[in-house]
Amino acid sequence: MQDDLLAVIDECLLYNEVCGNNLEYIRYFVIDRGYNLLALERFLRQTNREDIHAPDDEVWKDYRRNRVTEFVKRCAILVWRHRPAAIFSVNVVGWGPAPIIDFSESRPYTDALQDWRGWWEKGLVDAAFLMDYKRERVELQALDFRNWADYTLGLRKKSQRGRLIVGIGGYFNSRDDVLVQYRETVERGLGTCLFSYNRPTLEASESLGQLVADRSPVWTRIGEDIYPYPVPLPPPDWRDRQSFIAGYLKDSAGKPEAGIPVALMGTTYRVISDGSGFFAFCALPPGNYQLRVADHYLDGKSIDALPGKVTWLNEES
């Protein structure tokens, strides 16, 4: 399934002058999904287990969470390899309260199996759109909205590696409450987005069509009260100071080699090839590296990792 989706993205990138790629629903809806035969077979082989594991088994959850992360990484490398100026972004959830100490305690991590903080910190995305969809009229949800915004601001202060944007659930809120949440976000210096264009406010859902999409007066209010001047789209210039190395491990017959350690000699950088044999090092300091892959033809390969570039190691490059 991953390869099929990547093939669609690859075709779009090759034959269209796209300016960005965005992933939606890059998560699990509920915790009991993912029991397909291929995933089970790979999990059992990787962990040397023989049991039928429960949905809340922590090792099983980690396995599925890592597969989601691997897909995000593969998409990022694909986009940046073909279209370096394009923006690769993801929509991420802000379920429940914001984490107080550790992101691994939050519902996005435990329930959606979506380690979006890790994606951002490791340089896997240009932008993350936090779906901070909360009802302003419900006191606890209004507090959660602000706490997630504060959490987002705290992450941004730690690094300017990518963009973090707070999404407002317009369809949950009245016109006035939408503007309240916009102000809360802009006052923190954070970017904003609104879901959705077709139902920008709660009034639109009860309007028989006259207040949906561009007919909603909320757009005029946002333009007058929140953004009286145009705001340019920030370029993904953080990648100009980073380099990326990626490729596939395959045996002599062209079969993917999964679960193989890949390292950069003389550094602490180390990854494991995924089920397709894919591996990637993201957000590296530019420079010369030597690959370490025991008993493989890529072992010892010298790599000049250039700033803002994806160095692709396989023959088709």
Image: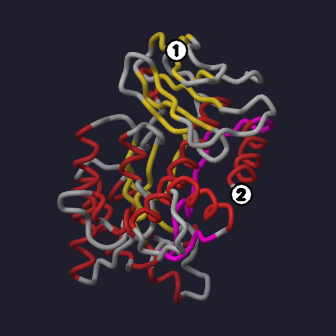
Q: Which residue is mark 2?
A: 1
Residue plotted at (67% across, 44% down): 276
Q: Are marks 1 and 2 in contact (CB under 8 Å)?
A: no
Q: From the viewer's perspective, is residue 302 above or below residue 136? A: above
Q: Amino acid at mark 2?
A: Met
Residue 131 visible (yes or no)? no
| Label 2 crowd (10 A; few <14 / some 14-19 / many >=20) | few
Residue 74 visible (yes or no)? yes
Main SS of the magenta segment? loop
From mark 1 to mark 2, how far is it between C-alphas? 32 Å
**Is 218 covered by the magenta stretch?**
no
Q: From the viewer's perspective, is residue 202 above or below residue 301? A: below
Q: State the image coordinates of residue 16 (x, y, percent, origin top left).
A: 77, 38
From the viewer's perspective, is the residue at label 1 or at label 2 nearer? 2
Could you tell which of marks 1 and 2 lies nearer the N-terminus? 2
Q: Amino acid at mark 1?
A: Leu
Residue plotted at (24% across, 62% down): 99
Residue stretch in magenta: 14-35
Q: From the viewer's perspective, is residue 208 above or below residue 201? A: below
Residue plotted at (37% across, 35% down): 161
* Towards the viewer: 263 or 239: 263
Q: State the image coordinates of residue 106 (x, y, percent, origin top left).
A: 30, 65
Q: Judge left or right: residue 267 versus residue 156.
A: right
Q: Quadrant of the N terminus?
A: bottom right
Q: State the image coordinates of residue 182 (x, y, percent, origin top left).
A: 32, 62
Q: Which residue is mark 1?
A: 306
Residue occupying the far left of the picture: 101
- Res 15 quadrant in image: top right
Under circle 1, the secondary element is: loop
Q: Judge left or right: residue 129 versus residue 85.
A: left
